[in-house]
Image: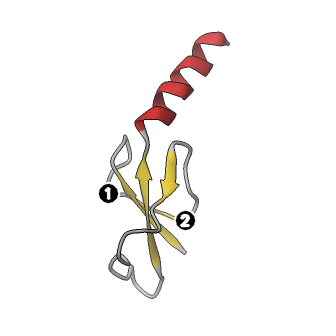
């Protein structure tokens, strides 16, 4: 399965592993096929970004 990233720092990229800060968007219609692979949209959540920034400051 290929994930199409929407929003965030990696907007528009096609990846095979869901990166940190993105979540599946199952309510959307299916994306266009990417070659012979099925695609699923993954959207960026700003709340996650704020949480990661807080975690990094603690280190």
Question: Which residue occupies 40% across, 84% down?
Answer: 35
Asked which secondary structure carries label 1, the reply is: loop
Query: Which quadrant would residue 36 be assigned to in this image?
Result: bottom left
Q: Nearer the viewer, residue 25 or 35?
A: 25
Disc 2/disc 1 C-alpha distance (Å): 13 Å
Q: Residue at x 51, y 35 (%)?
A: 48
Q: Relative to 9, is 50 on the left or the right?
A: right
In the displayed structure, would residue 55 be above or below residue 20? above
Per the image, the residue denoted by label 1 is 12
- Residue 33: image quadrant is bottom left
Q: Which residue is mark 2?
A: 16
Q: Where, quadrant-wise, is the C terminus in this rendering?
A: top right
Q: Which residue does the image show at 52% across and 21% down from the upper left?
A: 53
Residue 38 location, x and y as percent? 47, 81
Q: Residue at x 33, y 50 (%)?
A: 11
* Residue farthest along the top direction in this orientation: 58
């Amino acid at each position: 399965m290929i994930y199409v990233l929407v929003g965030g720092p990696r907007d528009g990229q096609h990846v095979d592993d869901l990166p940190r800060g993105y979540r599946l968007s199952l309510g959307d219609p299916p994306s266009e096929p990417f070659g012979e692979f099925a695609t699923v949209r993954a959207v960026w959540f700003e709340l996650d970004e704020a949480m990661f920034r807080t975690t990094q400051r603690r280190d």
